Each structure stands twice: as C-alpha cells, then as structure tokens.
Image (cartoon, rainbow, N blue to C red):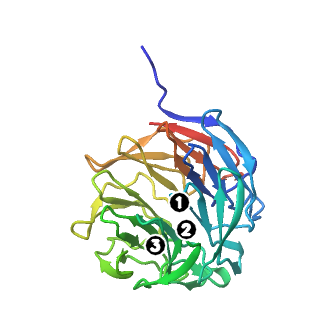
Amino acid sequence: MLFVYLGWSITGSMQYDRELHTATRLANGQVLVTGGKNTLGEILNTTELYDPTTETWTSTGNMNSIRVYHTATLLSSGKVLVTGGQINSSAYLNTAELYDPSTGIWSSAGTMNSSRAGHAASLLTNGKVLITGGCTATTMNIYLNTAELYDPSTGLWTNTGSMNDIRCLHTATVLANRQVLVAGGGNSTSTFSSSAERYDVSSGTWTYTGSLMYARAYHTAATLNNGKIVVTGGINTLLVNSTELYDPSTGQWTATGNLSEARRFHVSIQLTNGKVLVAGGYGSSILRSAELYDPSVGIWTVVQSMNYTRRSPAAALLINGKVLVSGGRRSSGGSSSSELYQP
C-alpha cells in the first residue's frame, strides 16, 4: 500500500531572503523568482530558479533594474516579461525586461507609457499583455486608471482604453470569454474600492460590472473550473476574512464561506483538484496558517499550517501538482526558505 504525506514539507532555500517577489513556472517546469526586497529593506535585482526534480535553487541572470511591487508574466514564447515596480520609496519604473530561459539573460522590453507599481498584468489570448492601474509618485500617492498593451511580436507598448476608476493593488483575471475582470484596489492612501469592470479586447474599452460586496485591496483572485472567480481577504478600513464569487454569466458577486482568519499579503492558487489553497499573509500577526476552499460546497477548511510564518511570499503550482511557496517576511525578519504543499 502506498502512503502519500499530505501537507507541508521543507524544500531547498533560495540564495537570498526576499518578500514581495514574483514566482513564475516556466515551460520546462522550473520556477523563476524575481526581485522583491530583503530583511534590510534593500530592493533586489537578483533572480533564481527552482528545480522541482532536485528541490534546489540556483542563481540566474540579474535583472537590469531592482524591482519590488512589479509583475512577471509568462509569454507564449516561453520568455518572462517583468514590468514596472519601485526602486525606492519615491522612484517608480516604466521599464520592462524579458527573461530568456534558454540563455538565463535579461534584455530590455521597452518602456511603458506610465511609471507604475502595484499594478496588474494579464496575458491575453492574442498573446499580448494588458497592464492595468497601479500607483506612482512619492509613497504611492497617485493612483492610475490607465492601461496599456505590450505586443511581444513588435516589442512595442501602446495605450488602450483607460479604466473607469483609479485602482492600485487590485486583481485582474482573464475570463473564459477572453475579457479581463479587474476588481477592487486602493483609490487613495486610506480608501478602497468595491467597483469591478471588464475589458473588451476587441474594442479596447472598459465597462462596469457588478460591484464587490466589500471594498478591498491586497486581496487575491483565483479562477475556478466552472469559470467563476473567487476573491479572498484583503483590507478596507479593517482586515477582511470574507470571500466572494463572481459569476461572469450574470456579472454579479455573491458571498461564499469566510476564511478562518482575516488576511492580506497572502497567496492563493488553484490546485489540480479544483480546490483553492490560501496560505500565509498578515492578520493580527504574520501568519503561517493555510486553508482550502471547496467550490462544490462553498466552504473553507483549515489544513496543516506551513512550517514558517510568511507575509508577502510567492507561490507557484508545479507540474507535479504540488505548490511551491517561497520567501516572505517572518516574525523574526525575511526568509529565504521555501516549502511544498502536497494536496
């Protein structure tokens, strides 16, 4: 009889401690992490690769710029596009870079029309990348409603229709009908949005859809097998433990089960079995707890906690169905550790 251990297990540590970094699974199954900041608050340009077959990390080429609050998107070519981010508390980037897994080298991918951090990036079915919103200027105090497109075939950036609302630290999700749903986000240093809107790729225009039941930023969104979107946690005036479902066919949001703990700076990822894993983040303190959402019953179940507390880690679903969670801030400082979740 074969016994499979379900839950969390420690795997190899990164070369650098980091939080607010990105994690992207490459076509070869390895995971690329980029940038973020370390325990000392230093913003990084280093990048690393995780190999699931050996459970080890190796350094790869450095980005041309240090970046935090940036995005990373896997293109249909297999390259990774990194955009924007901060280089310090008052300087924001409009530059973009491309990582080539075959060489381990970063090259320029041009400049966006706006400097931005805390924005969102969506890979469209036509191969282009849609960049939405974000913040700019000192201490993220200017919020953007602009959107732009990157065309990998030409390497050019072009403006597209602006969103109806300014938003930073929102979510953006490609729907089954190829439209893009953006939801929530901050619209000032102290207020948060409940609005949601959809981008029509063919016309380049945005239209409002049903509003979230709760205003929120620093939340996450995951796509379910039935095409609905589940949004989890975040913050408005207080930390949020509520979760809600968006139905693209009706354009409406409905409440679903609450998380056991309110959290932001967490990760959420859909598993191969269709359930959604939420882990870590920040609640009343830095969390190591994890929960599973079962769409068939709309209930969250607490599962084994991670081995370490983690705020602002990064997560990637591996080809073998396990989830890799890396880095994040721990109660005692930054972390280079990573661990695997076995569903």
Specify whether 156 is left or right of 336.
left
Q: Position of residue 173 (x, y in %)?
A: 41, 65
The answer for how far apart the CA atoms under marks 2 and 3 are is: 36 Å
> How many numbered marks, from 0 up?
3
* Callout 1: SS: loop
Query: Badges 3 and 1: C-beta atoms under 8 Å apart?
Result: no
Residue 50 vs residue 88, the one in the foreground: 50
In primary-sequence order, the first of circles 1 and 2 is: 1
Where residue 141 appears, as percent x and y from the top left, is 60, 84
**Residue annotated with mark 2:** 152
> At 61% from the left edge and 80% from the top edge, which residue is drawn?
140
Q: Residue furthest top?
A: 1
Looking at the image, the residue that sits furthest to the front is 153
- Whole-number angstrom distance, CA of label 3 to CA of label 1: 33 Å
Residue to which mark 1 is pinned: 75
Query: Is the residue under label 2 in contact with that under label 1 (CB below 8 Å)?
Result: yes
Disc 2 element: loop
Q: Amino acid at mark 3?
A: Asn
Disc 1 crowd rating (10 Å Cα; few below 14, some 14-19, many 20+) is some
Q: Is the residue marked by circle 3 packed among few (<14), some (14-19), or many (20+) residues within 10 Å?
A: many
Amino acid carrying mark 2 in the image? Pro
Q: On the image, numbered disc 3 is attached to which residue?
A: 236
Residue 139 visible? The answer is yes
Quarter holding the C terminus is top left
Q: Is residue 336 left or right of residue 189?
A: right
Q: State the residue at coordinates (27%, 53%).
A: 226
3 or 1: tag closer to the N-terminus: 1
Amino acid at dot 1: Leu
- At mark 3, the secondary structure is loop
> Up-down: is 185 above or below 2?
below
Q: Nearer the viewer, mark 2 or mark 3?
A: 2
Q: Nearer the viewer, mark 1 or mark 2?
A: 2
